[in-house]
Amino acid sequence: MIDVDICLSVADGRRRFDLAARFATDVPFAALYGPSGSGKTLTLQAIAGLLRPSAGHVRLAGRTLYDSAAGIDLAPPARRIGYLFQHYALFPHLSVRDNVAFGLTSWRQRRLSDEDKALADSLLESFGLRDMAHSRPHSLSGGQQQRVALARALACRPQVLLLDEPFAALNPMLRRSLRQELAQVRQRWNIPVLMITHDIDDVLELADVAFVYQKGQAVREIDLRKGQSRDLALQQFEVPAGPAESPMRQKLRSLLQGAVSP
C-alpha cells in the first residue's frame, strides 16, 4: 500500500507552486498522469525523501516514511525506494557495472561485499548488460541507459520503484518494446511501481490505476482494470494566522463588516 497525503510549496523568488497531493493505492502499477508542471515530480521527490513536505504523511507497506505530526522523516537510504530519474542520471565517469553497484556503497563502505558483488553481477546478467559492464554510459543507446538505471534502482532491494517519465528520453520507436520490458521487470521482481507520465499510452499499456494531476493536486482516480473513475477530494491550503488584533482593530473590523451587511 502506498499512502500519500502531503503539502509542500516551492518558490524561486518570483513564482510559487503549491502541492497538495492525496492518494492511496495497493495496485501493482500506479501512474500519476497529467501535464508538465502539475506537481507529479515534486510528489515523487517528496516520497523518496528528496524534498521535505510542510505537512502530511507518506506510508509504504505499513512503514511510515514521513509524518509531520509524529516528527518522523526517514533519510532517503532508509526509505528503501528505487528511483529512476527522467534522464537516468547515470554517472558518466563510472562504468556500467560501477553505476549499477553505486547504491550498494556509501562513504563509510566503499568496497562491495561478496554478496553485493553477486547481486550487481546478477543484475547485469538479468538486464543483458554483462558484455558492456566496463563501458561508459555515453557509449550506450537510450534503451541500454534505461536498463542500467533500472538495474541501479533495483540494486538497493527497494520496496517500491518510482519512475519519473521513464520513456521521455527515448526514440518513439523504442518506447513500445521498452514498455513491455518494464512490465516484465515489475512482474519478475514482484515490486509495486509508481510512474509519472504525461503520455497517455504509458498509462494505457502499463498502469492498473491512474491518478490525474491538475495544478498541484490529484483530482481524479481512474481504475483502468474496471474502466471506472471517481473524483478525489481536494485539499485546501491553510492560511497562516495573522497577528492578534487589538480591541480597537476588532471594533473597526466589526464596523466595516456591519457597513456592508445587507
Image (cartoon, helix red, strand yellow):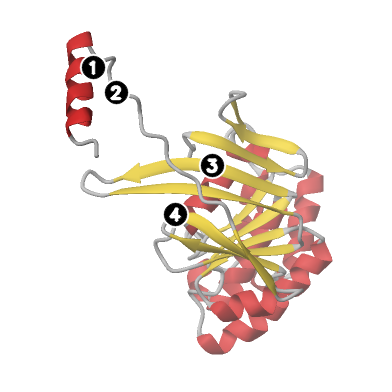
Viewer-nearest of discs 3 and 1: 1
Q: Are marks 2 and 3 in contact (CB under 8 Å)?
A: no
Mark 2 residue element: loop
Mark 1 residue element: helix
Q: Amino acid at mark 1?
A: Gln
Q: Position of residue 257 (x, y in %)?
A: 22, 30
Residue 6's disc number: 3
Mark positioned earlier in the residue sequence (1 or 2):
2
Mark 3 residue element: strand
Position of the C terminus by quadrant: top left
The image quarter in which residue 28 lies: bottom right
Q: Amino acid at mark 3?
A: Ile
User: Residue drawn at (58%, 63%), measured in percent from left and top?
Assistant: 220
Mark positioned earlier in the residue sequence (3 or 1):
3
Label 2 and label 3: CA atoms lie apart by: 23 Å
Q: Position of residue 103 (x, y in %)?
A: 63, 48
Residue behind mark 2: 242
Q: Amino acid at mark 4?
A: Gly
Q: Are marks 4 and 2 in contact (CB under 8 Å)?
A: no
Residue behind mark 1: 250
Q: Position of residue 59 (x, y in %)?
A: 68, 41
Label 1 and label 4: CA atoms lie apart by: 36 Å
Mark positioned earlier in the residue sequence (4 or 2):
4
Mark positioned earlier in the residue sequence (4 or 3):
3
Q: Nearer the viewer, residue 67 or 244?
A: 244
Label 4 and label 3: CA atoms lie apart by: 11 Å
Label 3 and label 1: CA atoms lie apart by: 35 Å
Q: Amino acid at mark 2?
A: Gly
Residue 128 can be seen, yes or no: no
Viewer-nearest of discs 1 and 2: 1
The image quarter in which residue 232 lies: bottom right
Q: Are marks 4 and 3 in contact (CB under 8 Å)?
A: no
